[in-house]
Amino acid sequence: MFKIDTEQETDNRWIAEIEELPGAMVYGETRYEAIAKVEALALRILADRLEHGEQPEQLNLLFAA
């Protein structure tokens, strides 16, 4: 399970980040939007790694063969 860190900027935008996944950081107009965006980005990052021959250990919790 990934931990999502959120913080509100001084301009009222929200940042959501998953530190365990480099590059998984987004901005949103609301906290909910930022969380939804970073969850979608995390899935794309994991899918990209899988397509390039990596086996992200986080996927071991989702699939069994």
Image (cartoon, grey):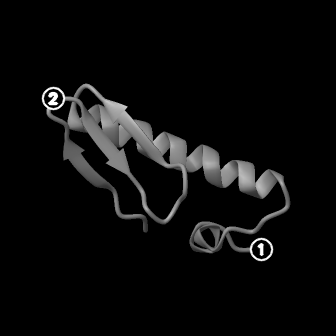
- Residue 57 falls in image quadrant: bottom right
> Which residue matches tag 1?
65
Front residue of 38/8: it is 8
The quarter of the rendered structure image containing the N terminus is: bottom left
Which mark is nearer the camera, 2 or 1?
2
Q: Position of residue 47 (x, y in %)?
A: 69, 50
Q: What residue does disc 2 label?
A: 12
Number of numbered tags placed on the structure image: 2
Q: Secondary structure at mark 2?
A: loop
64 and 21: which is toward the camera: 21
Q: Which mark is residue 3?
A: none
Residue 1 falls left or right of residue 13: right
In the image: residue 32, left or right of residue 3: left
Q: Amino acid at mark 1?
A: Ala
Dividing the picture into quarters, in which one does residue 64 lie? bottom right
In which quadrant will I find the C terminus?
A: bottom right
Q: State the residue at coordinates (33%, 56%).
A: 4
Tell me: residue 45, above or below residue 26.
below
Q: Name the residue nearer the viewer: 8 or 30.
A: 8
Left or right, 14 with respect to 10, comes to right
Amino acid at pointer 2: Asn
Residue neighbourhood size for the residue with mark 2, other residues' Cα within 10 Å, grouped as few (<14), some (14–19), many (≥20): few
